[in-house]
Amino acid sequence: MTRIALSRLPGERVAVSDGSGAVELAREELPDLVAEREARDDEPRWVWDDTARWYPPLLAAGVRVARCQDLRLGHDLLRRAPALDQALMDGPDADVWDRLRPGGPSEAVLFSVDDRAEHLRADVEDARQLRAVAASPESGRLGLLLAAESAGALVAAEMTYAGLPWRVDVHERLLVERLGPRPPRGARPALLEAAADEVRSLLEAPRLNPDSQPELVNALRRQGLAVTDTRASTLRRLEHPVVEPLLRHKQLAHLWTTNGWEWIDQWVRDGRFRPSYQPAGSTTGRWSSNGGGALSVPVQVRTAAVADEGWRLVVADVAQLEPRVLAGMSGDRALAAAARGGDLYQGMVEAGAVASRNEAKLGLLGAMYGATTGQSGRLVAGLTRRYPQAFGLVEEAARAGERGEGVRTLLGRGCPPISGAWDQESPDAPPDEESLAREASRRRAYGRFTRNFVVQGTGAEWALCWLADLRGRLWRLGGNGPLEQRPHLVFFLHDEVVVHTPTHLAEAVAADVEAAAATAGRLVFRGAAVDFPLSVSVVASYADAGKGGSATP
DNA sequence: AATGCCTGCGCC
DNA sequence: AAAGGGCGCAGGCATT
């Protein structure tokens, strides 16, 4: 397969190097060249330093690419990969690659903070990464991971470009219903103020600011309520007339500040919500988001995510992704058997491992998060006997972390090392009891992190493969138009995707979403026969997903 | 005025 | 005695 490396040159120029030679051209000539090579070659792999910098201008020019290699993501990943000989990653500009931060489309044009970072040789770094991976005993898995990570970066750019369809009128109607009319700048909505006034009156505190935690705690205590915090769960346990308006105030305040009118102004344009995604933004490989709060499109406002006329949203999520991942990566046959159906927890009940579905859930979550006490902790002990490989795997990851050792995901992503050696402050003095306790607690915390890392990280790898395969299928499904006129991904969150599609293709999209999940399972888990059943809904509004309306069985 | 930590919420 | 992973975001509050 052809690899075509793109590097920035001084003066808005670009170097294009495909192994058979290099050419230079002006930056504005690039979209035509890319479109031409996409059509002529059989899906070349575009090699560049950062998808978030190269791809948005291409998308804006109507050019979609099939494959890429994101060298920054690849570099970060390989630098942490335990199965890689790190010496092979050294060489010219390696230190600059080490320091690269994710770029945004805007800053790419405005700033060139570091001249060396601006003019890196993509072909040189690409060759280095290829060589290092080829020399690794886990070259196959690492190669898959790099490809999936890069495909994810393409998806991220495309989703920001296309945007999640967003009906501002629906959203604003909801805001007015719950909060009252939009207040002038600096003022608070009427219904929010009304709730605050009820709280002030019931607590006999006319000047109380209910958003101030210390003030609120004091006011509650003056009423004889023994509280030390103001969490909703704490408040719900109290018996006092102030609880209802207080909880209502909290909810309305949250709606107003995080998904209110200002959020709309800032994040919705031309009927689309365009959050910015950051692939591998979390150390486990999960994506993060740095704008718009795409990681929590709250249930409250999902009614505003509505497909265009003649279009539908296909919403799909995986049931119990991480327990299934654990079954697959540990090779635990008993857990894999429980995972064969649509409900893994129910499968555990039917196998007689636990008495109830809820116990199954508590026990598994406890194992993956490191619960040691309470009901969850007790369940973990019992389930360890029933599912020794699965529970043993997370237990072993936790022990490694407690010893200060790192762990890796199934495809080879390494976790960050434990931070801050405890005895560095005064290396010669014998540690006192308190610092010993601190150290022990720090190691346990790292153990909980490594325990979760292996599962969460491998889950993220499955999801990336799912996304990558689905992206290709959607493109092939859609005819000849540009991206936004075909079925295309508009949202992704850990184990859930949303596709915006012309209505007549919705069923075909639903089938492709399923097929892509099966492909991802085979790619990541090879022989291990673990199902990844989806719940798929074809809906007009995101809020209607998962209600069983047109869910496939 | 800007920065960073804390609390609390919500998403997985 | 306490012992639950990963994120983003907003407001309050202390610090500079």
Image (cartoon, coloured by chain):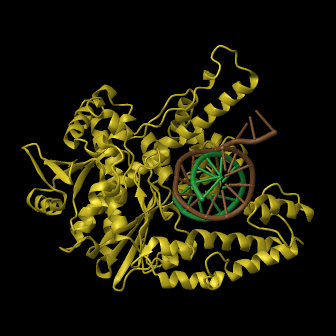
Chain colours: A yellow, B green, C brown
Residue A403 in picture, x, y percent from top left: 56, 26
Please tell me whether residue A24 is drawn above or below residue A295 in the rendered image. Answer: above
A80 and A194: which one is in front?
A194
Residue A359 in picture, x, y percent from top left: 64, 53
Figure quadrant of residue A349: bottom right
Q: Quadrant of the C terminus of chain A?
A: bottom left
Please give the name of the residue rendered at 31% of the width and 33% of the height, measured from the top-left corner.
A94
- Specify whether residue A327 is in view: no
Q: Is residue A294 left or right of residue A255?
A: left
- Specify whether residue A463 is in view: yes
A402 and A222: which one is in front?
A222
Please tell me whether residue A420 is drawn above or below residue A242 in the rendered image. Answer: above
Residue A63 in picture, x, y percent from top left: 21, 65
A503 and A132: which one is in front?
A132
Q: Is residue A13 left or right of residue A147?
A: left
Residue A37 in picture, x, y percent from top left: 11, 58
